[in-house]
């Protein structure tokens, strides 16, 4: 499991009005809760080889109305332990909300490839079901 405080999108998640942030154990542990459903949020990260990263990037950048078609065209997307693409994901335990941002490795560091994307409802299962 990833550490939310080490994610690039952490400050945006903390500032989201639908997210409740609670610190515990002398500030060493951070618990995030999605207010509309009351479910906790788990941070995760995934790495992809260049070909799989390009597939995932097409899915993430797909317009809302064409998301199902993009997912169907992508097929299964395999992750790798260390890859050219890096995906940061924060999702609720019930799968009703997720935030994600894709990064590409260039100039010896990961550069943002997308803005933070927020998904709700069935779109979360569509996109994260690929992994």
Image: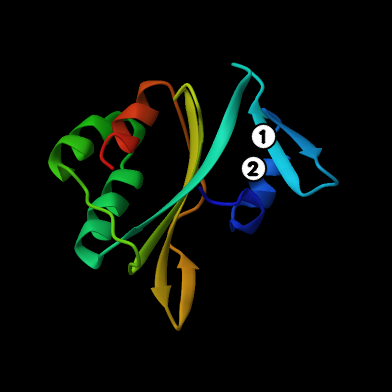
Residue situated in front as seen by the camera: 80 or 72: 80
Snapshot quadrant of residue 8: bottom right
Residue reaching furthest to the front: 25
Which percent across, then down, holds residue 9?
59, 52
Residue at horizontal 35 percent and vertical 45 percent from the top: 60
Of labels 1 and 2, earlier in sequence is: 2
Could you tell me if the residues under marks 1 and 2 are in contact, i.e. CB atoms within 8 Å?
A: yes
Would you say 86 lies left or right of 79 here? right
Residue reaching furthest to the bottom: 107
Residue at horizontal 42 percent and vertical 21 percent from the top: 121
Q: Secondary structure at mark 2?
A: helix
Name the disc covering residue 8, or none.
Answer: none
Q: Which residue is mark 1?
A: 32
Residue reaching furthest to the right: 26
Residue 125 sits above or below residue 23 on the image: above
Q: Secondary structure at mark 1?
A: strand
Which percent across, then down, holds residue 131?
28, 43
Would you say 27 lies left or right of 87 here? right
The alpha-carbon separation of the residues under discs 1 and 2 comes to: 9 Å
The number of callouts visible is: 2
Q: Which residue is mark 2?
A: 13
């Amino acid at each position: 499991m990833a550490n939310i405080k080490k994610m690039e999108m952490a400050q945006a998640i903390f500032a989201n009005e639908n997210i409740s942030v609670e610190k515990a154990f002398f500030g060493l542990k951070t618990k995030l809760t999605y207010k509309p459903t009351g479910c906790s949020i788990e941070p995760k990260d995934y790495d992809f080889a260049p070909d799989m990263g390009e597939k995932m990037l097409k899915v993430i950048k797909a317009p809302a109305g064409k998301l199902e078609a993009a997912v169907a065209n992508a097929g299964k997307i395999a992750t790798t332990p260390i890859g050219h693409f890096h995906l940061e994901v924060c999702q609720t335990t019930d799968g009703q909300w997720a935030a994600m941002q894709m990064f590409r490795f260039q100039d010896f560091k990961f550069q943002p490839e997308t803005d933070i994307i927020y998904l709700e409802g069935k779109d979360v299962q569509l996109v994260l079901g690929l992994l």
